[in-house]
């Protein structure tokens, strides 16, 4: 996952259409079409289940308990008032969702203490915010890679995608163009052109995926750089 284009790449601005998150925000401020907002929110929750699960695990819950809590959280989210909390001036879905998870866990913790006198949760000394953001960034990258793979399959280029996909997110890895040209049955120059085109398309799809989770085009690059840094910290 890379924020800056390679030398010579042309960066085209993302056409900022109405996304699922902007639908949620707009419906939060209006009484009309709440079912549209709920459908959009449901889709976002389905897409970002794993970052929430990772964050809950980081609070010391077992995998089984974390799965139950994640399910409880999304049930609460879809039945509750998240839409009323949406603030267009701070319109990054990642931040709102993470803050809501933290509040949910805090409420669960307080309830546990009240039900079991002297009880407490054992917290694992991890950086919960960092864990959430890394998992979120990975989810965005995986979604972009999946979309690119589907595009290549429709165009009859799945074999090329499969061979080159591991080289899309970074240009610092060693690439044996000789081996790739042999396995694909094409020249090294053809492999290099194919990889360049895939990288350009992958970056564009990444921007589109990030655009789904912010409310302003001005936030796209900052959010993308932040998520790239989160992933880079794990490598």
Image (cartoon, rainbow, N blue to C red):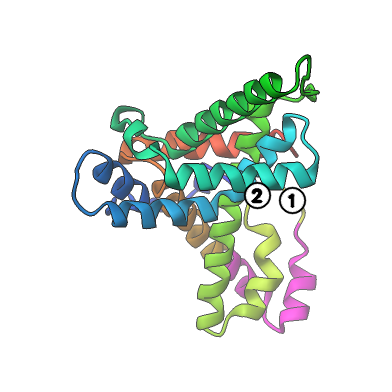
Q: Quadrant of the C terminus?
A: top right
Q: Is 233 left or right of 8, judged from the image as shown? A: right
Q: Are marks 2 and 1 in contact (CB under 8 Å)?
A: yes
Find out whether residue 188 is within the magenta segment.
yes
Residue name at image x 51 percent, y 82 percent: 154
Q: Position of residue 135 (x, y in %)?
A: 65, 42
The answer for how far apart the CA atoms under marks 2 and 1 are is 7 Å
The magenta stretch is 175-195
> Does residue 137 appear in the picture of this structure?
no
Q: Position of residue 91 (x, y in %)?
A: 36, 34
Residue name at image x 38 percent, y 57 percent: 39
Q: Residues within 10 Å of mark 1 (few under 14, many from 20)?
A: few
Front one among 213 and 190: 213
Residue name at image x 62 percent, y 79 percent: 158
- Residue at disc 1, secondary structure: loop
Give the farthest residue toward the top. Answer: 118
Residue name at image x 48 percent, y 62 percent: 201
Q: Residues within 10 Å of mark 2 (few under 14, many from 20)?
A: few
Find out whether residue 149 is within the magenta segment.
no
Q: Position of residue 182 (x, y in %)?
A: 77, 79
Q: Position of residue 229 (x, y in %)?
A: 61, 34
Which numbered marker is on residue 133? none
Front one among 122 and 137: 122
**Is 56 drawn above or below residue 203 in the view shown?**
above
Q: Which residue is mark 2?
A: 170
**Is 32 drawn above or below residue 178 in the view shown?**
above
**Is 216 drawn above or below residue 166 in the view shown?**
above
Q: Is 201 left or right of 12, judged from the image as shown? A: right
Q: Which of the 4 image quarters holds residue 65?
A: top right
Front one among 89 and 118: 118
Q: Which residue is mark 1?
A: 173
């Amino acid at each position: 996952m890379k924020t800056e284009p390679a030398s010579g790449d042309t960066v085209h601005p993302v056409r900022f259409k109405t996304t699922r998150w902007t639908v949620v925000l707009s419906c939060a401020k209006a009484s009309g079409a709440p079912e549209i907002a709920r459908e959009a929110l449901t889709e976002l929750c389905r897409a970002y289940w794993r970052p929430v699960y990772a964050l809950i695990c980081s609070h010391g819950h077992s995998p089984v308990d974390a799965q139950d809590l994640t399910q409880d959280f999304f049930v609460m989210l879809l039945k509750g008032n998240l839409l009323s909390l949406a603030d267009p001036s701070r319109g990054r879905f990642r931040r709102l969702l993470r803050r809501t998870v933290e509040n949910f866990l805090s409420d669960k913790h307080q309830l546990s203490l009240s039900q079991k006198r002297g009880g407490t949760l054992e917290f694992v000394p991890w950086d919960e915010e960092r864990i959430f953001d890394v998992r979120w960034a990975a989810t965005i990258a995986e979604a972009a890679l999946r979309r690119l793979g589907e595009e290549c399959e429709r165009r009859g280029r799945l074999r090329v995608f499969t061979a080159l996909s591991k080289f899309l997110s970074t240009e610092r890895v060693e690439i044996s163009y000789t081996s790739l040209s042999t396995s694909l049955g094409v020249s090294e120059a053809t492999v290099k052109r194919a990889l360049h085109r895939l990288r350009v398309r992958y970056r564009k799809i990444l921007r589109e995926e990030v655009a789904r989770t912010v409310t302003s085009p001005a936030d796209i690059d900052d959010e993308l750089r932040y998520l790239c840094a989160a992933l880079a910290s794990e490598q």
